[in-house]
Image (tube, helix red, strand yellow):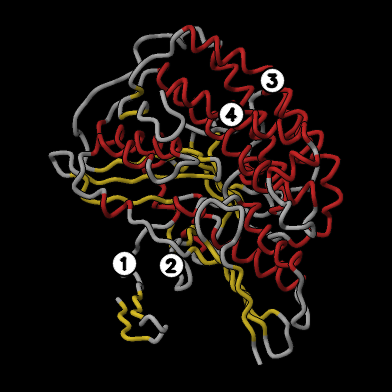
């Protein structure tokens, strides 16, 4: 008889999800899926709100990456306003977004994934957490905690709160940077360098021991997409999107926010509330692609900062073309973080960084606007339509996790088929299947938005567990 293995919930993720693995009569894997089981309707309940409220509303989607939503939302609003924000405001936003990237990557790498990397995928699950890391390797645990604090404190200094800051607004930011805050951030940089270098050196030493996992953790040819600058260096806040194929050939370049929906479509599947993004000319699922740290390093020719450029060159030695194995997302996150620290330091030396002119003002000059940015997990796009009074009539958000969704599902199936034979499996094997999803660091709260009719079901049970009524919509 066939059998279904259910991993519910998938642990050490942001949000709620589960994995189902279907075995055939011989106990081999017939199919497997990663299900995002929660639904949140931000696109729908933003309708009727004034467009200038959108950044603050959208920041509430997620407590881990609120800044990316702030930035993408504000850029969409600025397209409606037809304004260009001041140089200093753009630099301050860039620094805020990079600080969020550093703290989010620190959470993913140290808190969620390093227990597997340090203690082992077969280790006692009771110890596979950040406290287990601190106990086994105190300096590594401290580095992870300090790097997350570094990013969070910069967000707090700039935005006046660590989570859901309202500092980014349509037209720029609400207040300039003070000399005291600039100096406080600069004083934090040396410790941040020490901690990220420690992490990179440690990861280099342990990565080779995971060669078996590297081969089957979502390791397959795919497309990749991310933001770059005109000089082909990595970008998080401005720039335009580049899409490459599995050999590194450019399929499409210079995709601006207002052209995003011309190139990218979204499909739905019955087993997940998260949509599946794809490149329209290739269709679905052939046009599925990956975003995030791995994609960013695959499409960029340089990082644009000296230390990160050295690490990028080493990363590109992993494969003759784009690096395909999703296990290498861990490595790419560390390079991202090093770049973020270097770039923050560079921004703080900008002679105009303390300029007081940090906001442009305007009303409704267009009835539609789109904005895009790189969130820690990958490309994020906000698209809004408004009426003549500036009230939202329609909103669409394309989230990084939705763009990685097909790859995560393929990766879960690939790993499950490799490890589960004859219906036999161990806790360590199931942890490996979960760890495939953790390499992508999905943000499930961000990614779940209603599309069409939601297949909701309500069951009414008696105190004894007997089904009294069942309603579906």
Residues at circles 1 and 2 in contact by the CB criterion of under 8 Å: yes
Determine whether 435 is above or below 379 in the image.
Answer: below
Mark 3 or mark 2: name the one nearer the start of the chain.
Answer: 3
Residues at circles 3 and 1 in contact by the CB criterion of under 8 Å: no
Give the label on residue 191, or none: 3
- The quarter of the picture where the N terminus appears is bottom right
Residues at circles 2 and 4 in contact by the CB criterion of under 8 Å: no
Q: Residue at horizontal 32%, vertical 79%?
A: 472
Q: Nearer the viewer, mark 2 or mark 4?
A: 4
Q: Secondary structure at mark 3?
A: helix
Mark 2 or mark 4: name the one nearer the start of the chain.
Answer: 4
- Splitting the image into 4 quarters, where does residue 54 fall? top left
Name the residue that disc number 4 marks: 149
Name the residue that disc number 1 marks: 452
Percent x, y of residue 395? 29, 50
Q: Secondary structure at mark 1?
A: loop
Name the residue that disc number 2 marks: 268
- The quarter of the picture where the C terminus appears is bottom left
Mark 1 or mark 2: name the one nearer the start of the chain.
Answer: 2
Mark 1 or mark 4: name the one nearer the start of the chain.
Answer: 4
* Gap between marks 4 and 3 measured at Cα: 11 Å
Residues at circles 1 and 4 in contact by the CB criterion of under 8 Å: no
* Gap between marks 1 and 2 measured at Cα: 10 Å
Mark 3 or mark 1: name the one nearer the start of the chain.
Answer: 3
């Amino acid at each position: 008889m066939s059998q279904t293995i259910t991993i519910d919930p998938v642990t050490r993720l942001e949000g709620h999800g589960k994995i189902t693995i279907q075995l055939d009569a011989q106990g081999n894997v017939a199919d497997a899926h990663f299900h995002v089981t929660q639904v949140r309707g931000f696109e729908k309940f933003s309708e009727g709100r004034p467009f200038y409220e959108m950044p603050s509303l959208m920041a509430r989607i997620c407590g881990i990456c609120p800044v990316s939503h702030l930035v993408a939302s504000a850029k969409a609003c600025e397209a409606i306003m037809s304004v260009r924000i001041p140089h200093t405001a753009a630099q301050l936003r860039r620094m805020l977004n990079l600080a969020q990237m550093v703290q989010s990557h620190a959470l993913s790498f140290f808190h969620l994934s390093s227990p597997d990397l340090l203690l082992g995928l077969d280790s006692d699950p009771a110890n596979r957490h950040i406290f287990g890391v601190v106990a086994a390797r105190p300096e590594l645990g401290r580095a992870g905690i300090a790097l997350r604090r570094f990013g969070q404190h910069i967000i707090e200094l700039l935005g006046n709160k660590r989570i859901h800051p309202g500092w980014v607004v349509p037209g720029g930011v609400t207040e300039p940077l003070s000399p005291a805050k600039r100096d406080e951030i600069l004083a934090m940089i040396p410790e941040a360098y020490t901690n990220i270098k420690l992490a990179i050196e440690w990861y280099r030493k342990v990565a080779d021991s995971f060669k078996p996992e590297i081969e089957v953790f979502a390791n397959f040819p795919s497309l990749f997409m991310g933001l770059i600058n005109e000089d082909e260096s990595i970008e998080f806040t401005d720039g335009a999107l580049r899409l490459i194929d599995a050999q590194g050939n450019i399929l499409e370049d210079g995709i601006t926010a207002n052209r995003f929906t011309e190139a990218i479509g979204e499909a739905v599947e019955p087993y997940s509330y998260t949509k599946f993004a794809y490149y329209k000319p290739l269709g679905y699922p052939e046009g599925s692609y990956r975003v995030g740290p791995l994609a960013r390093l695959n499409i960029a020719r340089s990082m644009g900062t000296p230390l990160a450029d050295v690490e990028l060159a080493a990363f590109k030695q992993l494969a003759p073309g784009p690096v395909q194995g999703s296990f290498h997302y861990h490595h790419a996150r560390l390079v991202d973080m090093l770049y973020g620290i270097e770039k923050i330091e560079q921004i703080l030396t900008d002679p105009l960084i303390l300029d007081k002119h940090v906001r442009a003002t305007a009303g409704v000059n267009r009835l539609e606007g789109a904005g895009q940015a790189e969130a820690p997990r990958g490309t994020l796009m906000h698209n809004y339509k408004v009426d003549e009074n500036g009230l939202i009539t329609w909103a669409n958000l394309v989230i990084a996790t939705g763009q990685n969704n097909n790859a995560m599902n393929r990766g879960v199936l690939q790993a499950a088929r490799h490890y589960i034979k004859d219906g036999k499996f161990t806790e360590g094997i199931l942890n490996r299947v979960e760890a495939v999803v953790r390499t992508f660091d999905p943000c499930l709260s961000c990614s779940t938005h209603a599309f069409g009719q939601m297949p909701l079901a309500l069951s009414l049970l008696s105190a004894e567990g007997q089904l009294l009524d069942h309603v579906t919509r």
